[in-house]
Image: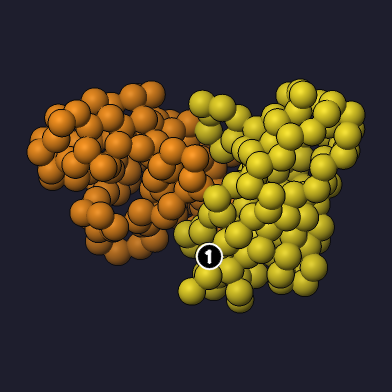
Amino acid sequence: GAGVSQSPSNKVTEKGKDVELRCDPISGHTALYWYRQRLGQGLEFLIYFQGNSAPDKSGLPSDRFSAERTGESVSTLTIQRTQQEDSAVYLCASSGAGYYEQYFGPGTRLTVT
Amino acid sequence: AQSVAQPEDQVNVAEGNPLTVKCTYSVSGNPYLFWYVQYPNRGLQFLLKYITGDNLVKGSYGFEAEFNKSQTSFHLKKPSALVSDSALYFCAVRPSGGSYIPTFGRGTSLIVHP
């Protein structure tokens, strides 16, 4: 079946602009995660959605970052007033029943100039 | 708090030789443990997991991992490495109860030489 998809695959933006990244999880997966991966580094947790529960936003690095999820489907991660340190690959993942392994999308590579 | 250590930034092995990528963890209670692989310019791909039961778990592409509770380790192994196994490998842990958010290690780059 279809995996996790993310769009755009690449985004180049000027410092100070807002960007919106999109994630389509696997159908039926109730859990959705956003991560940031800086060049040569591991995964940095950003935010977790579980069904209709309040999201766990404990990983968001600043109030410039926000995310929404429509029910158990699409999620968008918004970064306002982008800074150069926001340049990274943003990965989305979803999990199904049991919340065991995660299935990752291909990521969005964000470059802030 | 939970944590994962992957003590080697890079592992080099000759094709055909066995490989081991090390992972140790810290978590409250019983762990759920995972290995993922990341090929260049791709997202992470699930390899295998330990949830309960047999300490030796087998996964995709001939990989296996052994859960050792006393040593809090979950090393990834393969009997015979392939050049195509060259990639970045991540270990992750989360508690069996409580948080559904796993913690990932920093990753280990595996290079298999022809």
Kindly identify which chain the residue marked by label 1 belongs to.
A
In the shown orientation, is residue B27 left or right of residue B36? right
Q: Which chain is yellow?
A: A
Q: Is residue B74 above or below residue B22?
A: below
| Picture quarter with the C terminus of chain A | top right
Q: What residue is drawn where x is 36% and y is 30%?
A: B109
Q: Amino acid at mark 1?
A: Gly
| Number of numbered labels in the structure image | 1
Q: What residue is drawn where x is 48% and y is 31%?
A: B106
**Residue A44, image x and y in percent?**
62, 37
In the shown orientation, is residue A82 left or right of residue B51? right
**Residue A15, image x and y in percent?**
84, 26
Task: Pick the residue in front: B73 or A84.
Answer: A84
Query: Can you see residue A33?
Result: no
**Residue B112, image x and y in percent?**
22, 32
Q: What residue is drawn where x is 56% and y is 38%?
A: A43
Residue B37 falls in image quadrant: top left
Q: Is residue B46 above or below residue B93?
A: below
Query: Can you see residue B107?
Result: yes
- Identify the secondary structure beneath mark 1: loop
Q: Is residue B88 above or below residue B97?
A: above
Specify the farthest residue to the left.
B16
Q: Which chain is orange?
A: B
Q: Badge 1 is on which residue?
A: A3
**Residue B82, image x and y in percent?**
19, 41
In the shown orientation, is residue B4 left or right of residue B110? right
